[in-house]
Image: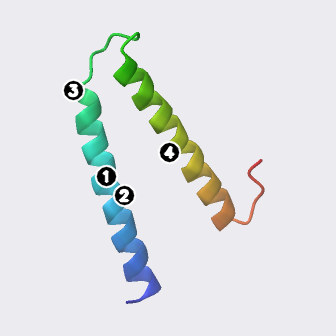
Amino acid sequence: MTARSLRNSLLGYKASADDELLTALQALDVDPTCEAQHSAVRVLDHAHRVARIFAANLQRRPHG
């Protein structure tokens, strides 16, 4: 497997997981006091932060 095909495969898995997550989020109540919604926002925040760290590492930049 080439590095390119591995990268594309991994990004495909991530896109699929993101689609599943968005589908699950659409099923949540829009009530801001909903515990499930609060947990989902925390998970999304974590995923975003990890993605930013990963991007910074790929670019060999500090990420603080």
Local packing at callout 1 (Cα closer than 10 Å; few below 14, some 14-19, many 20+) is few
Label 3 or label 1, whichever comes before in sequence order: 1
Q: Residue at x 64, y 66 (%)?
A: 58
Q: Residue at x 50, y 45 (%)?
A: 47
Disc 4 designates what residue? 47
Disc 1 designates what residue? 17
What kind of residue is marked 3? Ala
From the viewer's perspective, tell me whether residue 37 is left or right of residue 46.
left
Residue 14 numbered mark, or none: 2
- Alpha-carbon distance for marks 1 and 4? 12 Å
Single out the residue that lies furthest toward the front: 35
Residue 38, horizontal then vertical, whole percent:
43, 22
Local packing at callout 4 (Cα closer than 10 Å; few below 14, some 14-19, many 20+) is few
What kind of residue is marked 2? Lys
- SS type, badge 1: helix
What kind of residue is marked 1? Ala
From the viewer's perspective, tell me whether residue 59 is left or right of residue 21.
right
For the residue pair 34 and 25, the one nearer the viewer reads as 34
Q: Count numbered badges in the picture.
A: 4
Vertical comparison of 63 with 9: above or below: above
Local packing at callout 3 (Cα closer than 10 Å; few below 14, some 14-19, many 20+) is few
Label 4 or label 2, whichever comes before in sequence order: 2
